[in-house]
Image (cartoon, rainbow, N blue to C red):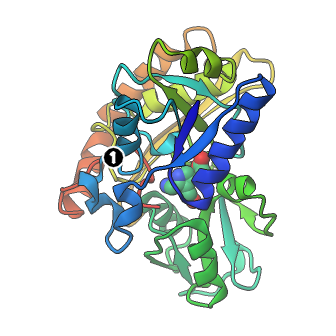
């Protein structure tokens, strides 16, 4: 079976993880690299690429529908909410660390960075959250693959950069950094989770389904539901994080929309029962809208000139 993947180091590491897991199940695979528009146009903001929608995902869908690949591996947080029904997400792998990480040039923790320190990120969510937490810091756009971003930090162009911890873990890089608490830095919906897609009704679907991790599937689904009414999910600062409690009776759910400058937040932070959790998450999603969350998300989108729409942190 052929696994299609983007060519970035992170994408390859993720595809190799799936290949390894399938091999344990006796399924042999080979990798095929697909270049997506999200990879090609690294010179412009991602929300302006491929109309923003699923820049890293759509082209893999196309080659899969053409039958050129059997399995596609994605960072689940890069997947748009609306998916082709013929291309189900057959497995949600066990989640890695869902949190963001701050790496600073000289190891200074966030609370001790001098005023006006420059923090690189091109995630609108991370920028807004940093500005909310430390309005005296300066955020600057930083695109590129993880290795590019690390190089720019080492070159001294930034005092600190923000990344998903999971990305570094998957590349096998043990870097000293500060894990940012979800209390202040609610992660992007589905951050730290790998999704595996196949065509419905194929041998690949049957083989891949063994890899599905129930709790990770539940948590990621809840995260998507929480923000689903905020406008089809846009390149706006939105975070959402669901955590199943150890007794498996409750979920701790958080979701928030921020203004681009981090000065306004509309969010929820609650414990909900596992039984009926989906329904409760829908209610909370609606309450975010009623509290003005959609209005805030729309305002951010307008400020971005409005040509873009996607579900998450696509810009990195
Ligand atoms: N937006 C790009 C992207 N998609 C997934 C990850 C990291 C791995 C993950 O969250 O699953 C990253 C890099 C980052 O946000 O720093």
Judge whether residue 240 can be spotted in this image. Answer: no
In the picture shown, does residue 214 fall above or below 77?
Answer: above
* Nearer the observer, 277 or 154: 154
* Disc 1 secondary structure class: loop
* Nearer the observer, 102 or 71: 71
* Nearer the observer, 56 or 296: 56
Q: Mark 1 points at which residue?
A: 310
Q: Which residue extends farthest bottom?
A: 156
Query: Residue 104, how many percent across, how many down?
Result: 69, 78
| Ligand 1 closer than 8 Å to label 1 CB | no
Query: Residue 306, how many percent across, how many down?
Result: 18, 56
In the picture shown, does residue 14 fall above or below 253?
Answer: below
Which residue lies at the image location 65% right of the left edge and 24% below the top edge? 251
**Left or right: where does residue 20 sit relative to residue 314?**
right
Query: Residue 108, how many percent across, how many down?
Result: 75, 80
Q: Which residue extends farthest top?
A: 275
Query: Residue 155, how many percent across, how many down?
Result: 62, 90
The quadrant where residue 124 appears = bottom left
**Left or right: where does residue 236 sit relative to residue 179?**
left
The quadrant where residue 73 appears = top right
**Left or right: where does residue 160 sit relative to residue 48?**
right
In the picture shown, does residue 294 fall above or below 123?
Answer: above
* Nearer the observer, 264 or 162: 162
Viewport quadrant of the N terminus: top right
Q: Residues within 10 Å of mark 1 (few under 14, many from 20)?
A: many
Numbered marks: total: 1
Which residue lies at the image location 60% right of the left edge and 63% below the top edge? 163
**Left or right: where does residue 110 sit relative to residue 305?**
right
Judge whether residue 150 can be spotted in this image. Answer: yes
């Amino acid at each position: 079976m052929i696994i299609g993947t983007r060519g970035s180091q992170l994408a390859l590491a993720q595809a190799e993880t799936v290949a390894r897991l399938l091999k344990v199940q006796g399924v042999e695979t080979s990798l095929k690299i697909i270049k997506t528009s999200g990879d090609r146009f690294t010179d412009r903001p991602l929300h302006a690429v491929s109309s923003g929608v699923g820049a890293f995902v759509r082209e893999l869908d196309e080659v899969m529908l053409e039958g050129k690949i059997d399995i596609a591996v994605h960072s689940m947080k890069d997947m748009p909410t609306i998916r082709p029904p013929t291309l189900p997400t057959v497995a949600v792998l066990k989640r890695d660390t869902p949190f963001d990480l701050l790496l600073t040039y000289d190891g200074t923790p966030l609370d001790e960075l001098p005023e006006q320190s420059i923090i690189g990120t091109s995630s609108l969510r991370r920028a807004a959250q940093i500005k909310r937490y430390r309005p005296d810091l300066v955020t600057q756009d930083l695109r590129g693959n993880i290795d590019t971003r690390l190089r720019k930090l080492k070159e001294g162009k930034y005092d600190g950069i923000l990344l998903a911890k999971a990305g570094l873990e998957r590349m096998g890089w043990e870097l000293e950094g500060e894990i940012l608490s979800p209390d202040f830095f609610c992660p992007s919906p589905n951050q730290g989770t790998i999704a595996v897609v196949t065509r419905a009704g194929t041998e690949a679907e049957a083989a891949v389904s063994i890899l599905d991790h129930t709790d990770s599937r539940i948590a990621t689904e809840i995260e998507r539901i929480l923000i689903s009414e905020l406008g089809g999910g846009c390149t706006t600062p939105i975070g959402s994080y669901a955590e199943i409690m150890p007794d498996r009776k409750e979920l701790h759910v958080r979701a928030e929309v921020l203004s681009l400058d981090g000065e306004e937040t509309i969010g929820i932070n609650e414990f909900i029962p596992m039984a009926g959790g989906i329904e409760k998450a829908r209610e909370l999603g609606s309450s975010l809208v009623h509290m003005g969350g959609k209005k805030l998300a729309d305002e951010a989108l307008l400020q971005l000139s409005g040509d873009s729409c996607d579900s998450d942190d696509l810009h990195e």
